[in-house]
Image (tube, rainbow, N blue to C red):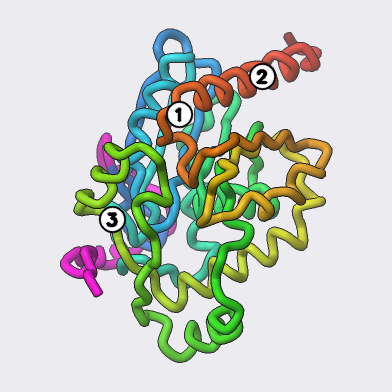
Amino acid sequence: MIERGEGQPAWPPQGGTRWSDVGPDHATTPDGLRLRTREWPAKGAARARILLVHGIAEHSGRYARTASLLAMTGFDVAAFDLRGFGESGGRRAYVDRWDDYLDDVEGRLAALRDGLPVVLMGHSMGALIALTYALDDRPAPDLLVLNAPALSTGTPAHLRLVAPLLSRVTPRLRIATPLRAEQISSDSNTQRAYLADPLLVPFTTARLGAELLAAGTRAQARIHALRVPTLVTHGSADTLVPTACTEPLGAIACVERRVYPGLRHETLNEPQGPQIVAGIAAWIGGHLARQEDADPRT
């Protein structure tokens, strides 16, 4: 198994109980991990702030095109590498508990709040993180954008059964991620860039796998409690998170679900990506306008 993340050390805990911004491109979590952060300022006056949460194996730098396009339409965009991924600290592809991700999202959202509306946007595992955050008892975002949220995956039934046991007995066990570049996008340049990216982590761990599966199960059981206006986008040719996984979301009153024919897992990185981003920007703008009209103070 090729383990590209093998040589990336875990950042040692530094103590402390509060978030600390340690520079223009890093922040420190309450438990002492340093997270890589990125920002794309809005062109002109910002209408809202968007926090992007990436998926498993990858990092926030892969969203530069999407973030730049959103910034051009008047949104401040921020992102960060999840703990254990990209240039952030932590054991590669490992998390002690799912709530660690939610704590990190809460901290980064707090850093963005300054009176403007806040949008939480995620892809795949990042979309599941965003959804479970919105369903938790935490300061809610104003809007939610979920791209192929990993409510369920193609994990074989026998692995789902043994996942909790492996998580307890050997939580750091590395398991190769069975992902092919052609599954993420039909664009050959995207595929080549994915395979050549030295920051990608081509494995998961027993603990993260179990936490991901359990989070998807909990989210499915609670999605009818969702109250945040939500846009779900999904490619019909997604073989990593089949479109059937998001059908229950489409039945919820506050959710609009869009399925794009023929597109694969990373719809934002398909050749049609800029058009999909434009649709997301228009959806956000429309909801912001309706919220402003309903606000008696405006």
Q: Which residue is mark 1?
A: 273
The percent coordinates of residue 170 (x first, y second) are 41, 87
Residue of label 3: 200
Residue 187 is situated, as x and y percent measured from the top left of the image, at 35, 37
Q: Quadrant of the C terminus?
A: top right
Residue at x 75%, y 42% (from the top left corner): 250
| Residue 112 vs residue 171, the one in the foreground | 171
Residue 33 visible (yes or no): yes
**Residue 48 placed where, x, y %?**
54, 22
**Disc 1 crowd, CA 10 A, few/some/many (<14, 14-19, 20+):** some
**Relative horizontal placement of residue 283, taking residue 226 as reference (left or right):** left
Q: Residues within 10 Å of mark 2 (few under 14, many from 20)?
A: some
| Residue 157 - label | none
Residue span colored magenta: 1-25
Identify the amino acid type marked 3: Leu
**C-beta proximity under 8 Å, tags 1 and 2:** no
Whole-percent x, y for residue 18 in the image: 43, 52
Nearer the observer, disc 3 or disc 2?
3
What's the CA distance linking mark 1 and mark 3? 21 Å
Q: Which mark identifies residue 288?
A: 2
Q: Quadrant of the N terminus?
A: bottom left
| Three-letter amino acid code of the residue under disc 1 | Gly
Front of the two marks 1 and 3: 1
Q: Amino acid at mark 2?
A: Leu
Q: How many neighbours does mark 3 have within 10 angstroms: few (below 14), some (14-19), or many (20 or more)?
A: some
Instruction: Find the distance from the CA under tag 3 to the CA under tag 2.
Output: 35 Å
- The image quadrant that residue 179 belongs to is bottom left
Helix, strand or loop at label 1? It is helix
